[in-house]
């Protein structure tokens, strides 16, 4: 009786691990960018309905102008993992995130990852001065109102992560989750090695 009970407990534990593994992470052990994007989401359930629907879809047009730093074109983004920081010059959390964005930009630069700031929400005329005084070290530009509407930007900052195929994989995530999503995508879509 006791052996049968222990065998049943063992079977339940194994089945439970399989079920939990299937829900939490892919069986291969790779991080799941979609699960991380949902876990790190900054908004409410009704907002997730709009932002979650963007995941896996081609990125909307990103109309940027008046770059501070090196300009980034659509061609520059092709084949890259792109982190877009929708920020505003008047937004305290946006400004507080700049040092972390600088670190992320440097950390992933040689792995085919681009971080670009998209300044909107009003006060864009102050962007060059704010970028200089706050020490932005990554490309940043003014984003058109049409682009913020196409991207469903509802708050500032709003982070988006786009994969190498040009599909949105995360939107509206907390700054602390940007690297987690990027790491998952690097595992899923490693950078192509260049010939030496």
Image: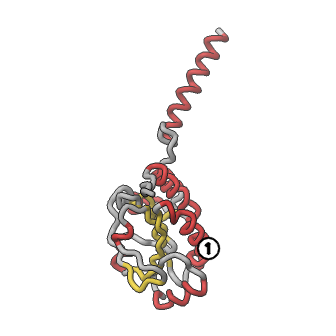
The x, y position of residue 10, in whole percent, is 60, 21
Identified at 47% across, 79% down, the residue is 140
- From where the camera sits, is residue 54 visible? no
User: Observer-nearest residue: 49 or 26?
Assistant: 26
Identified at 52% across, 37% down, the residue is 21
Q: Residues within 10 Å of mark 1 (few under 14, many from 20)?
A: some
User: Observer-nearest residue: 115 or 178?
Assistant: 115
Q: Classify 168 as above or below 144.
A: above
Identified at 48% across, 77% down, the residue is 139
Position of 82 with respect to 165 (left or right) is right
Instruction: Name the colouring of the figure.
Output: secondary structure
- From where the camera sits, is residue 115 visible? yes
- The residue positioned farthest toward the front in the image shown: 196
Q: Count of labels shown?
A: 1
User: Observer-nearest residue: 89 or 49?
Assistant: 89
- The image quadrant where one finds the N terminus is top right
The x, y position of residue 166, in whole percent, is 35, 61
The residue that mark 1 highlights is 99
- The image quadrant where one finds the C terminus is bottom left
Identified at 45% across, 69% down, the residue is 84
The secondary structure type at the circle numbered 1 is helix
The x, y position of residue 177, in whole percent, is 55, 60
- The quarter holding residue 180 reads bottom right
- The residue positioned farthest toward the right in the image shown: 2
């Amino acid at each position: 009786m006791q052996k049968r009970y222990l065998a049943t407990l063992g079977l339940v534990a194994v089945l439970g691990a399989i079920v939990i593994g299937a829900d939490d992470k892919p069986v291969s052990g790779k991080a799941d960018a979609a699960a991380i994007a949902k876990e790190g989401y900054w908004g409410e359930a009704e907002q997730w309905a709009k932002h979650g629907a963007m995941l896996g879809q081609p990125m909307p047009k990103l109309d940027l102008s008046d770059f501070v730093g090196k300009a980034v074109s659509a061609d520059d983004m092709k084949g890259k993992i792109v982190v877009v920081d929708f920020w505003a010059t008047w937004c305290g959390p946006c400004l507080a995130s700049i040092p972390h964005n600088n670190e992320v930009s440097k950390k992933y630069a040689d792995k085919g990852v681009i971080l670009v700031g998209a300044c909107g929400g009003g006060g864009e005329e102050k962007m060059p001065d704010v970028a200089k005084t706050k020490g932005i070290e990554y490309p940043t530009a003014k984003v058109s109102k049409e682009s913020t509407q196409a991207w469903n930007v509802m708050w500032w900052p709003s982070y988006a992560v786009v994969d190498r195929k040009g599909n949105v994989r995360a939107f509206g995530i907390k700054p602390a989750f940007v690297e987690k999503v990027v790491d998952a995508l690097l595992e899923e879509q490693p950078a192509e090695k260049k010939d030496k």
